[in-house]
Image (cartoon, rainbow, N blue to C red):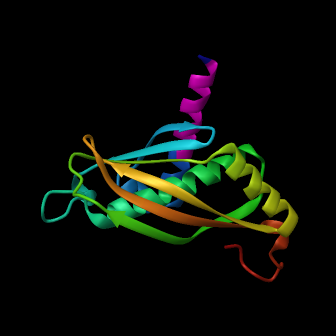
Amino acid sequence: MTSMASNSTAASSLEALLHREIPASKAFSIQVSSLDSGQICLEAPVAENNINIHGTAFAGSIYSMSALAAWALMFDCMQRADCHADLVIAKANIQYQRPAVGSIIATTRLSDETLQAFFSDLEENGKARLEAHVDVFDRTALRATNQVCLVAISRSSIPADQPPL
């Protein structure tokens, strides 16, 4: 039960951070519905700011949410590892399959091996990159996939006269 409560607290804390630091996440009504070590699920309604003229999910909302799912999961993993680096999305390649209705649900997970390699590269080289595969569903089926490339640069590797990423 303690694990479930701490995961719920971590999800709430991450959601608050996203809404504060990335205002579009609040405008899109994105919620961190689950967060566990190495996996995340974000949800938002297909309504208000996430709807297109056809009454289905706006493609920009799907793209933003899927990219944010990858970034938020890696950000959380970095916090858990007490890792001090700037994390950015370097590239993303989304494939839309069918329109989403009702809800947008973005999920991704990172294996222990992937995370271990990422943190080793970051420690050894001052920078690291990884690819995260994100699946986007509505309440009935898979609607899109996004391959998101994340890059981290250790804050100790950034020259003092250069602003952080």
Q: In this view, does 77 lie to the left or right of 21?
A: right
Q: State the quadrant of the N terminus.
A: top right
> Residue 157 location in percent, x, y?
83, 72
Q: State the quadrant of the C terminus.
A: bottom right
Whether the magenta-drawn stretch holds residue 121 is answered as: no
Q: In the picture shown, does residue 78 fall above or below 139?
A: below
Residue at 50 percent across and 46 percent down: it is 15
Q: In the picture shown, does residue 65 fall above or below 6?
A: below
Q: Magenta region: which residues?
A: 2-14
Residue 78 visible in the displayed image: no
Q: In which quarter of the image is residue 140?
A: top left
Compare residues 42 and 163 and report the one nearer the observer: 42
Residue at 82 percent across and 68 percent down: it is 126
Q: In this view, does 120 lie to the left or right of 140?
A: right
Q: In the picture shown, does residue 67 fall above or below 6?
A: below
> Residue 98 location in percent, x, y?
23, 58
